[in-house]
């Protein structure tokens, strides 16, 4: 399929063989990996460390295993790949694989956070009939990610950002991160993302 035909079908061409995101939120995977490159080797090593020592990563991997969805480098469904600049990681719902963007990993803590984020999506897909094309499914999963990854913990919200009113600020933080995740995952407006997130927000914050 040539570039023009791909664009007619709503699919973008890979950028210099980088894993990239279509407007509909689906992924185009890089098809030539340089497994001996420094970036790839470093990424694999960081993933191994996260899986062995990352507290939340270990809990999620154990949960996935109990559901019958073993996930890891050894099962070849956590993959290090080069990605376009706007991606740091993704979950490929078609292949049931976590993609870590090897050219975006800054340090081990960042890797831990990224893996936790994507493994929550993986868990949602494993335990329920998750439809990546369904905006409400994606919104509710994005809320759980924001609520559970620690990005909106009390000490970050109130001490680092000098904001007060824990419950209200926590919920607002969760909402904002979920909206941002929706806009990164889909080619939709902020208004539309907020509308879908608000449908799921209070239920997921309360029950996550």
Image: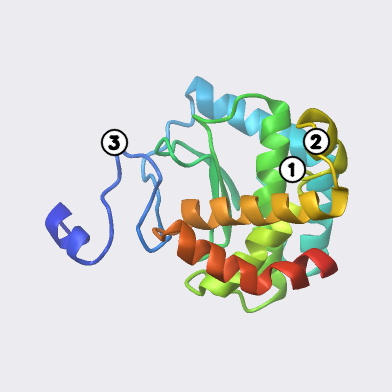
Q: Which residue is mark 1?
A: 151
Place of residue 81 in the rendered image (x, y in percent of width and height, measured from the top left): 48, 39
* Distance of label 1 from label 2 (alpha carbons): 7 Å
Q: Which residue is mark 2?
A: 156
Q: Mark 3 or mark 2: name the one nearer the start of the chain.
A: 3
Place of residue 197 in the rendered image (x, y in percent of width and height, measured from the top left): 60, 66
- Name which residue lies at 74% across and 43% down: 151
Front tag of 1 and 2:
2
Could you tell me if the residues under marks 1 and 3 are in contact, i.e. CB atoms within 8 Å?
no
Vertical order, 171 against 103 (above or below): below
Could you tell me if the residues under marks 3 and 2 are in contact, i.e. CB atoms within 8 Å?
no
Residue 84: name its quadrant.
Answer: top left
Residue positioned most to the top: 38
> Split into 4 quadrants, where in the image is the C terminus?
bottom right
- Name which residue lies at 48% across and 42% down: 87
Place of residue 147 in the rendered image (x, y in percent of width and height, measured from the top left): 76, 55
**Crowding near pointer 1: few (<14 within 10 Å), some, many (20+)?**
some
Residue 167: name its quadrant.
Answer: bottom right
- Name which residue lies at 47% across and 57% down: 190
Query: What secondary structure is found at the residue carrying circle 1?
Result: loop
Is residue 91 shown to the viewer in this render? no
**Crowding near pointer 2: few (<14 within 10 Å), some, many (20+)?**
some
């Amino acid at each position: 399929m040539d570039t023009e035909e791909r664009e007619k079908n709503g699919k973008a061409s890979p950028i210099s063989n980088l894993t990239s995101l279509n407007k509909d939120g689906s992924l185009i995977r890089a098809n030539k990996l340089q497994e001996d490159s420094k970036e790839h080797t470093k990424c694999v090593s960081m993933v191994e460390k996260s899986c062995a020592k990352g507290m939340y990563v270990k809990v999620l991997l154990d949960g996935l295993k109990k559901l019958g969805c073993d996930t890891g480098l050894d099962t070849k469904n956590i993959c290090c790949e080069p990605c376009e600049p706007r991606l740091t990681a993704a979950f490929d719902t078609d292949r049931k694989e976590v993609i870590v963007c090897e050219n975006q990993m800054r340090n081990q803590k960042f890797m831990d956070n990224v893996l936790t984020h994507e493994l929550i999506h993986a868990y949602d897909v494993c335990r329920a009939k998750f439809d990546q094309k369904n905006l409400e499914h994606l919104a509710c999963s994005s809320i759980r990610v924001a609520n559970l990854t620690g990005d909106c913990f009390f000490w970050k919200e109130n001490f680092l950002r000098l904001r007060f009113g824990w419950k209200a600020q926590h919920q607002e933080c969760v909402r904002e991160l979920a909206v941002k995740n929706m806009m990164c995952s889909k080619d939709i407006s902020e208004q539309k993302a907020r509308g879908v997130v608000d449908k799921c927000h209070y239920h997921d914050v309360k029950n996550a």
